[in-house]
Image (cartoon, rainbow, N blue to C red):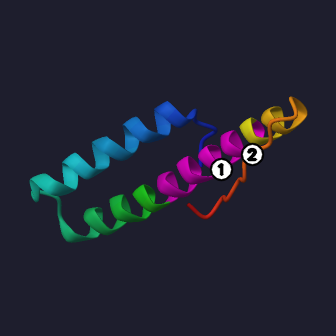
Amino acid sequence: MEDLSFEESLEKLEEIVNKLENGDVPLDDAIDEFNRAMQLVKVCNEKLNSAEESIAKIVEENGELIEFNSNE
């Protein structure tokens, strides 16, 4: 998948969701769009996890470590 920013990935995901919610997409296209949406969800999740880890590291370096749980 393209190297998109979080915001770009989220925007494309919203476009796919809107298209699928309208219901006028042929089944084969809907399946392709759903698969693409799942890839975008994965990209967004990875970027969020990376950002959370970076923030936790910065806080740790400042001596104010707050418990970090990436499963939330």
Residue 19 in the image: state x and y as whole percent. 20, 49
Q: Is residue 22 above or below residue 63?
A: below
Residue type at mark 1 is Asn
Q: Nearer the viewer, residue 35 or 59?
A: 59
Instruction: Say what secondary structure mark 1 lies in.
Output: helix
Residue type at mark 2 is Glu
Query: In percent of the image, x 32 and y 69: which residue is there?
Result: 31
Instruction: Say what secondary structure mark 2 lies in.
Output: helix
Residue 12 in the image: state x and y as whole percent. 39, 40
Q: Which mark is residue 2?
A: none
Q: Nearer the viewer, residue 30 or 15?
A: 15
Label 2: how many residues lie within 10 Å, few (<14), some (14-19) or many (20+)? some
Query: In percent of the image, x 30 and y 49: which residue is there?
Result: 16
Query: In percent of the image, x 55 and y 60: which residue is there?
Result: 72
Q: Which residue is mark 2?
A: 53
Query: In percent of the image, x 26 and y 64: which residue is there?
Result: 30
- Residue 7 in the figure: left or right of residue 34: right
The answer to which image quadrant residue 3 occupies is top right
- Residue 59 in the figure: left or right of residue 16: right
Residue 44 in the image: state x and y as whole percent. 54, 47
The answer to which image quadrant residue 10 occupies is top left
Q: Find the distance from the CA under tag 2 to the CA under tag 1.
A: 6 Å
- Pointers 2 and 1 in contact (CB under 8 A)? yes
Q: Nearer the viewer, residue 65 or 16?
A: 65
Q: Which residues are magenta?
A: 39-54
- Residue 9 in the figure: left or right of residue 47: left
Q: Which residue is mark 1?
A: 49
Q: Main secondary structure of the magenta part?
A: helix
Q: Is residue 48 magenta?
A: yes
